[in-house]
Every structure is written in C-alpha cells, then in structure tokens.
Amino acid sequence: MYDREYFLSYLQAEFPLVNDWLFYLIENSDDIKWIIDYIEESPETFEQMLLYLSEGIRLLPTRPISLSVFSQIITLDANAFNPTRMLGKLWLHLLAETKRLDKTEPVMYPKKEEDIDVLLQDYLLFREDISDSVTLTNLFAETRAGYHPVWEAAAWSHSVLTIPLREIGKLKAIYPAHEQPIVWVVDDAEVFSRITDRVPVLPMICTRQKWTRTAWEVFDRLIDSGSELRFIGDLTPLGVVRAEELLLRYPGKVRTWHMDIKTYLKAKDTEVNLTESDYMLLKKQHVDYLATLKDEMRDQGHPGNLIIVIDDLIEKLTHYYRK
C-alpha cells in the first residue's frame, strides 16, 4: 500500500540535494495538494522527475543561461523545464523553497509571469535573454576565437552598442579601447549621450539607473581584465546609493567621479525638493567618503542635476581623452 510519508522519506535518502524540499512535502499538504495528487497518481514518474530536479540543483549555473539551454543540459529536452509543464512547475516550487528564508512560512509559489521571471533570474536562469541588456561604447571584446568583430568595428568607429545578455555569454574578456584601463559607468542616459557627442573616444557604459544582469556580466569581465570602473552617478539620494552598491560589489576596483560636495552645490536644483523616500535612501548603505555628500544633501534638501554642470565635466574629460 502506498504511504506518502514513507515514500518521500525514502526519496530523501536517495536525493539529498533536495532533502529540504522533500521534507516540506512531508510536513505540509494544504498548499501543495497539486504536488501530492501528482505523486499519488504516479510515484515512479515523480521519482524520475526528482532525478532531474536534483541534477538541476547540482548544476545550478554560475553564469546566466537561458532556461531552455539549462533544460537541454539536464534532461536532453529544451522544453522540459518550461513553467507550463509539470517538471517546470515542480522546479519553480523547488527553487521557491530553496529561496525561502523563514522556514516556518509557506513556500511562495510564483503565479504571475513577472514573479516567475524574478525567481528564475535569482538563480541566473532566463526564459529569454534579449530584453536584459546594457548600452556601451569604445570597448573591445574577445571570444575564444579572438577579437569579436562587431565590438571591434564599433570601437574603431566610436559607435554605441546595446548588447543583450545572450551575447555576453559568448565573451571571455572585455576591456577598454583605450590605453588607459578605465571604463566610465554613466548612470544617466542624457549625460551619457552628451558625453558621447563631445568625447567620442571615451570608453563608457550607460546603466540607466538600473543594474541589469548584462551590466554585471560586463563589469565582471572588465574587472577580470584589469580595468577600473569610474562611476559618474546622479547627484541624488538614489545616485549615491547606487554608487555605494557598485563600490561595495567591487572593493578597490571602483571610484566615483565628481560625486562630491563641491560639484553637488554647483549642480543643486533648488526647484526640486527631496521627498520622504529620498531621505530614507540617504540612510542606506555605508561608504565613508560619500557620507559627507549625504549629509550635505540632507541639509540642503535638494537633489543635484548633472546636466547643470555637464559642460564642466565634459571639459575635464576632453582634456584627458583627446582624439
């Protein structure tokens, strides 16, 4: 006679990598009736699926990969981990249980498409790898076969590229197309455009106030190639927090540029007041040398606008990066 608890306990011994998830299936029933029904319908099929799930946990990627490629590696079927299939649904539940911090709370199974994407991306899995991208200019890239021709042509012509995540996975190295090993990370799209127009040789990345997975992958390769990141952030509470996030992620490899009190006071926009959420942001993170800028911004009560001082910034960049 089938005994669910005995069967799942047996599977715990057979598949230790998913032990916690199986324990959850033993201890709970209300929110996982669909799983219990499936197990009871075909224990043998569930055990086969558990083999794939365990292998999936063992081979969780360390670099972003499309879900279909991951599925092909694990099961030899590119569609097996599709969230509409039973194996895909079990995979999502397993990941949600793995992500759960408070083991006394129920597993939060994602139901909305965006929630599914967020959960998968937490484990570097992407259902599609086109929309996640980053904009850059004057960077060289290498594949195992040598220079990437598109990046090389764009660098020589000082063209701007928007690169999706799927293309970054093919690259083994990225570095600036300039003798100085510095890449400028510009958080504001308008500032990026203005600098590109007048300092076309500057190696730059535009992050548009969002850390995409593609941006992190590019940063990782730049750091591995010995480059330094120079962050030109907005003189706003959010801009300061984002600067701190980058500094903390790559200690000793990142510097901010003109994120100081002198520049802030010149760029201060007195027509805009800091909001309550802005003041909350000023309490986040802790990087000592940005603390005085935070204090000044808090005292002044206004954000800065880099466009106000863009000509000064471009003049300095032009001095260092002549054609």
Image (spheres, rainbow, N blue to C red):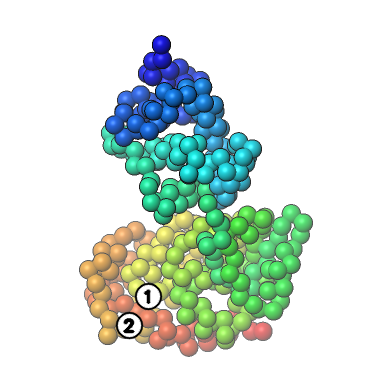
At 31% across and 35% down in the image, what residue appears?
31
Whole-percent x and y of residue 27?
Answer: 32, 25
At 63% across and 59% down in the image, what residue appears?
167
Secondary structure at badge 1 equals: loop
How far is mark 1 from mark 2, CA to CA?
Answer: 8 Å
User: Which quadrant would residue 175 be assigned to in this image?
Assistant: bottom right
Mark 2 residue crowding within 10 angstroms, few (<14) / some (14–19) / many (20+): many
Locate the N terminus and report the quarter of the image it occupies: top left
Residue contact between numbered discs 1 and 2, judged by CB atoms under 8 Å: yes
Q: Which amino acid, by three-letter code, is at mark 1? A: Leu
User: Which quadrant would residue 296 be assigned to in this image?
Assistant: bottom left
At 38% across and 15% down in the image, what residue appears?
3
Residue 92 is at least partly visible in this image: yes
Whole-percent x and y of residue 199?
Answer: 59, 83
Q: Which mark is residue 25?
A: none
Residue at the extreme right of the image, as rendered: 145
Q: Which mark is residue 268?
A: 2
Secondary structure at badge 2 equals: loop
State which tag comes first along the sequence, 1 or 2: 1
Q: Residue 235 carries which label?
A: 1
Q: Compared with residue 97, is residue 198 higher up or lower down, i.e. above or below?
A: below
Mark 1 residue crowding within 10 angstroms, few (<14) / some (14–19) / many (20+): many
Locate the C terminus and report the quarter of the image it occupies: bottom right
Whole-percent x and y of residue 34?
Answer: 38, 33
Whole-percent x and y of residue 44?
Answer: 51, 22
Q: Nearer the viewer, residue 288 or 170?
A: 170
Q: Which amino acid, by three-letter code, is at mark 2? A: Lys
> Quick check: 54 left or right of 29?
right
Residue 180 is at least partly visible in this image: no
